[in-house]
Amino acid sequence: MSVYRGTILLRLFIILFCCLWGGLLFWQIIRSDLANHSANPRAYAVYTAKRGSILERNGEILAYSEATERGYERRYLEPISTSHLIGYLHPRYGMTGLEKRYNSYLVQQRDIILTIDRTIQQVAEDRLDSPGAIVVLQPRTGQILAMVSKPYLNSNLLSELWLDYTSDVASPFFNRGTSGLYPPGSTLKPFLLAGAYEEGTTTPSAVIHDRGQITFDNQVIRNFGGIAHGSITVKQALALSSNQVFAQLAVSLGSTMLRYYHMFSMDSSWDLGVVNKSARMPSEHQSSFGWAQLGIGQGGMLVTPLQMAVAVSTIANRGVRMEPYLVREITGPWLMRRYQRPLVHSTVISSHTAAHVRDAMVLAVSQGTAQAARIPGLEVAGKTGTAQNQQGVDHSWFIGFAPADDPKVAIVVLVEHGGTGGLRAAPIGNTVIKTALESMEERLIP
Amino acid sequence: MNSRNNVWIELGLWGSASFFCLMHHKDGSSWWQLISLWVLFFTLFLITKHRAAPTSGLLIVATFAVIGWLFMCRIDASLALAHWQHWIAASIAYLLALHINWSDYNHKYLYGIFTLLILLITVLIGVEIGGAKAWLNLGSLQFQPIEFARVPLLLFLGGYFYDNQLLLRASSRWPLLRYWGPMFLLMAGVFLFLGVQRDLGPALLFFAIFITMSLYTAFSWHSAAIYLSIGILGVMVGWFQFTHFQQRVWVWLNPWMYEHSLGYQILQGLFALNAGGVFGTGLGYGRGLLIPEVHTDYIFALIGEEFGLVGATLVLLLYLTLLFWIVKISAYTSDKGHLLAIGVMLLWGFQVFLVVAGILKLIPLSGMTLPFISYGGSSLMANMWLLGIITSLGVKRNVCV
């Protein structure tokens, strides 16, 4: 029996189509170098194409594509300090930040909605007048309401100012909020206190005699200004920022203290879409003096403002640590819409412990070192820090949240070489908290 | 494949097409075209069924119609509307062809002369577009007669090979001019006119169809040798006669040297395919619109970009399925119908091959449309007419086993 003759032609076409498929395979899969060929408009088209806007939490535009005669150009609106988060998109200098991370969505002309609040970001930008960083979080959700790092780029003026930016010793490309590593100084004390309460090392009402200094391994740790506070409770010790008391607590906690620092996120980094760093935890083998140093935020302990913000939010959120995030929503038709919900990371301390630490921080604002953060008619919890460093004048820190009984915002202010925390960082924190609460009240955000 | 399964596959396809359409067009203003195309194909399906003709070919073509319409919609809404109108006209051509019994037609010479006449008219009053004088203006209508000429040409070839197959096979050595003469004369006329029009793509296509049909009917090494030498002669004539032809070959061999001039189209096509990768960028998210003639000659590059290797492979497989279906029909028809069906299969098979291989830089570009998917009324109508012929050949009354 002979095969039907027509199949011979069918075989011919099967062979021919196999050749075609080989060609497809070659050009679509194997020749991946074509994507960057100089004649391929796809290689640079992204810089002149219309892309989605980047909006702040209330829908106000932060970045958009503007039509020009040479295609679309990216424009960035006030507050300009969002450039550390949004990054830039420039035909000569490439793309960075969220523009890069969410490029695949933006090129589809889908909008990105951030957790940033324009008003809070603006006031933080205005109030921070020298190199440093401000991070504002919503404790309940972990949303980043504002993140300012000074100095910052103006992404609209890259062509004009690129050389100035690259030669600036203050490095405007560097996001101090997420990547700047600083000794935390006394702002670390609330977390040590939380660990000590949780472990039963001390109680809020325990009385300790403060002599103004203490010696470990023949090395002296002194209170700020060498002041002796006399017989005080542990709560008052935090309010007055007694180095002696916290050095003692740290030595009795030992390496357990590092476990708490770890749980409070001080060696964490997150998938924010923006580069963020963490330093390694100090070694678990320390002398008594080493532990004492770590208890007052010196001695090799390095943190970023964002880590401090997550830590202080954890206390504000009754001991529950939330994952911080920056992008709330990616718009899109129907099923393609992406929405980020708040994520619980872990419960670090009991709500009971958190309440005690909060009370101590409230005391610090009402009667202690952080009185500059006081707001009439509002209970603010806070802690200042004055961190010694090898580069020069002390770094000035303030961490806090408000209202103390139902925290809506948590804030971290760091002023590089700003001197005493209570004089420099706390007043900035005060203004930002006030504006943030007013702004959120106006918008009726729960 | 049984026909019920086909219908289910088809319904799924239309559903996903509507989904794509909704996803891509936020206004969704063109949805009625998709619905009416569906109604149109459903009607054609019922009529075909009613005439006891096979429906698989129609279902495959309906798939092409959806793909084509989706891409027209994606390129430009006004293009989609025109494409939709072309489909309405083409379905009338299909119905006309379906109602004629093609298994035993006469007047093959009439068809042959008709082919020449169409080409002659194009030579005399044609308009030059894109390097080839292949267009006719009829009032506001513009069409490509060559697309219509292929129908009578296939009828002529099928009829001639059938009527004379015994004589043609008689000599196993050199083909006898006595028997082959009329055929050679007519084909020479066709190639002459196509050469004058500088429409070299169809010339190549017709040549491939002609030699394959002739070798299929009456194979001999001698005739194969003759065709080979004619082919080489043709290329040489083309080389020295048409700068157009030389250019295309140079550009084909090294498009990278002409990346912003003559090689632009082929390079942009390759970049588009490359951007597609395995799964494609998704409908509407490619940058294939930069390719010149993306809606006609280069639609396959856009499919490759937006549906990826997977989509492009599926399209090729669908064409193979269509060819398979024609071969299946040809096995059960009268001998005349058999050769006609083989001719149509060769036409579509070679056309798809030449177009896609051109885009893939395997051969020089031939400047033809992708059957049933590309934009173009003349091409759609002619192809639907041919589909009507094939379907009509498969009508049960013609079956003679």
Image: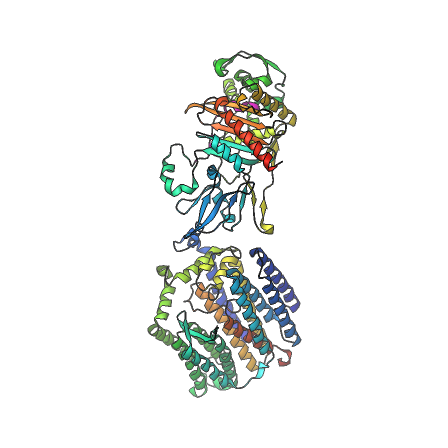
**A183 falls in the magenta region:** yes
Residue A246's spot in the image, x, y percent? Answer: 55, 18
Determine if residue B173 is in view.
Answer: no
Quadrant where the image shows the N terminus of chain A: bottom right
Query: What percent of the width, then of the height, locates residue B152?
Result: 50, 80
Left or right of residue B401, residue A114 in this image = left
> Quick one: B58 or B326, which is closer to the camera?
B58
- Residue farthest left in this picture: B240
Frontmost residue, A291 versus B281: B281
- Residue B378, placed above or below residue A260: below
State which region is magenta.
A173-190
- Residue nearest the observer in this picture, B333 or B196: B196
Quarter occupied by the C terminus of chain A:
top right
Please identify the quarter of the rendering in which residue A129 is found. Answer: top left
Q: Is residue A171 magenta?
A: no
* Quadrant of the image occupied by residue B184: bottom left
- Residue A229 picture location, percent across and down: 55, 12
Which color scheme does this rendered protein use?
Answer: rainbow
Q: Is residue A246 left or right of residue B354?
A: right
What number of labels is visible? 0
Residue B1 is left or right of residue B190, and the answer is: right
Q: Nearer the viewer, residue A196 or B180?
A: A196
> Percent x, y for residue B317?
54, 65
Residue A411 against residue B188 in the figure, above or below: above
Residue A419 in view, yes or no: yes
